[in-house]
Image (cartoon, rainbow, N blue to C red):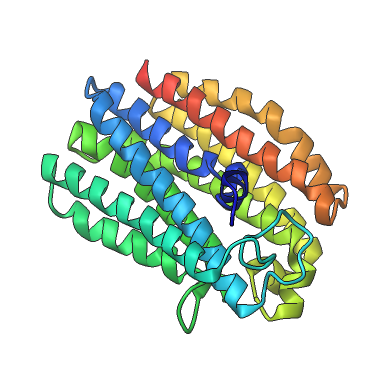
C-alpha cells in the first residue's frame, strides 16, 4: 500500500515552482492593466499544478514500465522502486489530467472556447513526453516542450483568462519563466545523464554530453535574467525587481559549473526551483505596479 508521503514524493515537489511561477507572472501582467481576477487566477493555478503533477506521474509510469528508472541516482520513483503499481500511477496521472481538463473547461466557458484546443494539446504533450511508442522526451525535445507549455502558454494563457487579451509584456515575461523551467529540466537530466544514456533515453543532456550540458544550464539561467532586464527596459520598469532573484541562482550555477554530479546536484535542482519561484513573485509585483 503506497503511503501518502510516497505519493507526495512521486509528485516531485521540487518541480512545482515551474507550475506556480508562470501563473504568478501572468497574473501580474493582468493586474498591470487592471484586469486581475482572483477566481480565474486560482483556476489557472489549478490547471498548471494539475498538469505538472500529472506529467510527473505520467513520466514515473512510462519510465517505470520501460525500465528506465530501475537504476537511479535521484529521488525515488514509485514504479521503478515498486512502491506503487504501474496501473495505480497511470490512474493518478489520468486523474490529474482530468482535473486540468475540467478546470480548463470552466475557464474556456468564461472566456473563449479556443482555449480547449490549447488545453488538449498541453495534455497530449504531457502524456507523450515519455509515453506512447515514440516519446519525444527520449529524443532531446523535452526542453522545447517545457519552454512552450510552462513558459509561453502558461504565462500568456493566465493573462488571457483574466484580461481577455494577449499582452506583449506577458509574451516577453513568459521567456525568462520558460527558460528557468528549462533549467530545471536541464539540471535534472544532467543528474541522470549516465543512467539515461545506459537505458537508451536520449535526453538533450545525453546528446550534448556532460560538459556542454553544464554550460547550457548556466547559459539558460543567465539569459533568463537578461530577458528580465529587457522587459524592464522596454515594457515595465519595475520588472527589474525580478533581477534580485539572481542571488538565488548563483549557488546552483556554481555547483553545476563546478562539476557536481549525481546526488550532489539535488540542491542545485531545489535552488533552481526556488530561483524560478522568487523570480515569478518579483516579476508579478513588478508587472502589476
Q: Identify the image quadrant of residue 194.
A: bottom right
Which residue is at a point 31% across and 63% down the rendered structure image?
Answer: 121
- Quarter of the rendering containing residue 93: bottom left
- Name, please, the residue furthest toward the front: 1
- Residue 10 as seen in the image, left or right of residue 262: left
114 is higher (above) or lower (below) than 80: above
For the C terminus, the quadrant is top left
Position of 218 with respect to 56 (left or right) is right
Is residue 27 something that shows in the picture? yes
Residue 112 is situated, as x and y percent measured from the top left of the image, at: 13, 47
- The number of callouts visible is 0
Residue drawn at x 17%, y 37% as measured from the top left: 164
Decide: is 279 above or below 66. above
Q: Is residue 167 visible?
A: no
Position in image of residue 185 (x %, y %) = 61, 55
Q: Residue furthest bottom?
A: 133
Vertical side of 31 occupied by 91: above or below: below
Residue 283 placement, left or right of 72:
left
Amino acid at each position: 500500500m503506497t503511503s501518502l508521503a510516497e505519493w507526495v514524493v512521486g509528485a516531485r515537489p521540487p518541480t512545482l515552482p515551474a507550475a506556480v511561477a508562470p501563473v504568478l507572472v501572468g497574473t501580474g501582467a493582468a493586474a498591470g492593466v487592471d484586469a486581475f481576477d482572483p477566481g480565474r487566477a486560482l483556476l489557472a493555478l489549478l490547471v498548471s499544478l494539475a498538469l505538472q503533477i500529472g506529467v510527473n506521474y505520467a513520466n514515473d509510469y512510462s519510465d517505470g514500465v520501460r525500465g528506465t528508472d530501475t537504476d537511479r541516482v535521484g529521488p525515488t520513483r514509485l514504479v521503478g522502486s515498486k512502491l506503487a503499481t504501474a496501473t495505480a500511477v497511470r490512474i493518478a496521472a489520468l486523474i490529474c489530467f482530468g482535473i486540468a481538463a475540467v478546470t480548463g473547461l470552466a475557464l474556456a466557458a468564461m472566456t473563449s472556447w479556443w482555449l480547449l484546443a490549447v488545453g488538449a494539446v498541453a495534455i497530449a504533450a504531457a502524456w507523450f513526453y515519455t509515453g506512447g511508442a515514440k516519446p519525444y522526451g527520449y529524443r532531446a525535445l523535452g526542453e522545447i516542450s517545457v519552454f512552450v507549455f510552462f513558459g509561453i502558454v502558461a504565462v500568456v494563457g493566465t493573462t488571457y483568462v483574466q484580461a481577455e487579451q494577449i499582452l506583449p509584456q506577458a509574451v516577453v515575461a513568459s521567456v525568462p519563466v520558460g527558460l528557468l523551467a528549462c533549467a530545471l529540466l536541464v539540471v535534472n537530466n544532467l543528474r541522470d545523464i549516465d543512467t539515461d544514456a545506459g537505458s537508451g533515453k536520449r535526453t538533450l543532456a545525453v546528446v550534448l554530453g556532460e560538459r556542454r550540458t553544464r554550460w547550457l544550464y548556466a547559459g539558460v539561467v543567465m539569459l533568463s535574467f537578461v530577458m528580465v532586464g529587457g522587459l524592464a527596459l522596454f515594457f515595465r520598469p519595475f520588472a527589474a525587481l525580478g533581477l534580485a532573484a539572481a542571488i538565488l541562482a548563483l549557488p546552483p550555477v556554481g555547483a553545476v559549473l563546478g562539476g557536481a554530479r549525481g546526488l550532489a546536484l539535488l540542491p542545485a535542482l531545489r535552488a533552481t526551483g526556488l530561483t524560478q519561484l522568487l523570480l515569478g513573485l518579483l516579476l508579478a509585483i513588478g508587472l502589476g505596479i
